[in-house]
Image: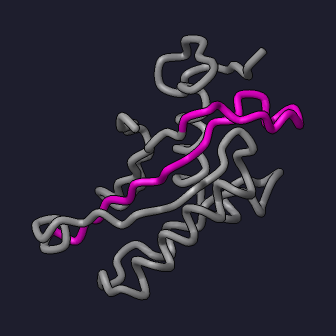
Amino acid sequence: MSSFGLDRFTGKPISGWAHVLQSVDVIFETEIGDRVMLRHFGGGMRRLLGRRLTQPVLALAASVFALSIAIWEPRLRVVRVGIAPSAEEIRQGTVSFVMEVVYRPNGHRGDFTEEPASRLVGVGVKDNGVLATMEYAA
């Protein structure tokens, strides 16, 4: 039995992979200290926004993505994080990341059995916020 919840925009029930993607959104969009009852929750990405897109900043952002998932989303295991900026993205001050993850449908219940194939999740930093809803075919 996978977890389920409500879509934060429509209020309709969601479960499984859609719920995981929403969870990733929430992790990355929440700054550490924002939640009163869970001050240490979040991805800490806002602190990196507005910085010049140098190799060290890109590497730090990739590490923050992977670490945030490792801490807060037990249904995913990050295999690798790739930085995928195009020249146009860099000129506009935006950047995209692609995370290769392995889905563990019941990881939140302590069952870390993994699906056999990995999945690719795109994470784009845009408009002073983080979007993590894109899924790519593996």
| Residue farthest right in this picture | 110
Relative to 44, is 111 above or below?
Answer: above
- The spot of residue 94 in percent (x, y) is 25, 65
Residue 112 part of the magenta-drawn span: yes
| Residue farthest top in this picture | 12
- The spot of residue 75 in percent (x, y) is 70, 38
Q: Is residue 87 left or right of residue 96?
A: left
Name the image quarter holding residue 5. top right
Relative to 17, is 37 above or below?
Answer: below
> Which residue is at a point 69% across and 19% down the rendered structure image?
4
Residue 111 part of the magenta-drawn span: yes
Instruction: Name the foreground residue: 34 vs 18.
Output: 18
What is the span of residues highlighted in magenta in the rendered image?
A: 92-117
Q: Which colour scheme is used?
A: one colour
Q: Where the N terminus falls, by quadrant?
A: top right
Instruction: Name the foreground residue: 136 vs 5.
Output: 136
> Which residue is at a point 46% across and 76% down the rendered structure image?
48
> Which residue is at a point 60% across and 12% down the rendered structure image?
13
Q: Where the C terminus falls, by quadrant?
A: top left
Instruction: Name the foreground residue: 119 vs 8.
Output: 119
